[in-house]
Image (cartoon, rainbow, N blue to C red):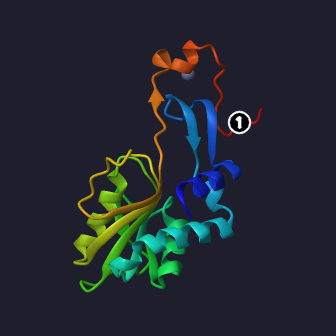
Amino acid sequence: MNQDAVIALFRESGALLEGHFKLSSGLHSGGYLQCALVLQHPKHAEALGRALGELLKPLGATVVLSPALGGLIIGHEVGRALGVRAIFAERQEKTLTLRRGFTLAPSDRVVVIEDVVTTGGSTRETMVVAEQSGAKVVAAGSVIDRSGGNATLGVPFHSLVTLSLPTYQPDECPMCKAGTAVTKPGSRT
Ligand SMILES: [Zn+2]
């Protein structure tokens, strides 16, 4: 599945919108990305997981670890593609932790999987969870890389699509200056 096919799938699912948006952060953007809208279709989630799994297969992972909630579905599908366990870390009093009896052994080779990597912050945090249990993080992966290839993780990082969606302060927004109407993603028109 090449970059164009993935983007087409996102557009078709309404997971990638182009226009003039006011994001929940208050910033404006010409694009809006909501991975959950593509991953809500199990067959799309499976196909994306398989594509990501292909890229990661040579690393010999024994387990997929994802941060809840965003990484859960795609992590599960990458686990399916690689034929390994897919577990997740979740927040307990602000700290990402393994719960529910999930464990990692020092012999485990972990790939950290997310839906979107923006700054790499949550990926790094998830890597720490694996390292604290003595396991080795061999790679990270995401469906979409919004970092513009700038996420420095210290391990190989694979994504299906590199996407740049610039955001603007409202008073500096070129689309506002051009006089186009701003919409809130998710609101019906
Ligand atoms: Zn604007």
Q: Amino acid at mark 1?
A: Ser
The total of numbered circles placed on residues is 1
Q: Residue at x 64, y 52 (%)?
A: 8
Residue 178, image x and y in percent? 59, 14
The residue shown at (47%, 62%) is 68
Q: Which residue is mark 1?
A: 187
Image-based side of 51 in relation to 155, left or right: right
Quick check: 137 above or below 151? below
- Is residue 173 something one can see in this rendering? yes
User: Ligand 1 appears in which quadrant?
Assistant: top right
**x, y percentage for residue 168?**
46, 25
Looking at the image, the residue that sits furthest to the right is: 189
- Please say if 189 is above or below 114: above
Residue 172: x %, y % from top left: 46, 17
- Residue at left 71%, top 36%? 187
Q: Is residue 135 left or right of residue 5?
A: left
Q: Residues within 10 Å of mark 1 (few under 14, many from 20)?
A: few
Give SS at disc 1. Answer: loop
Above or below 169: residue 48: below
Indicate the quadrant containing the N terminus: top left, top right, bottom left or bottom right: bottom right
Q: Can you see residue 91?
A: no
* Image position of 26 (left or right of 15): left
Q: Quadrant of the C terminus?
A: top right
Of 42 and 9, nearer the camera is 9
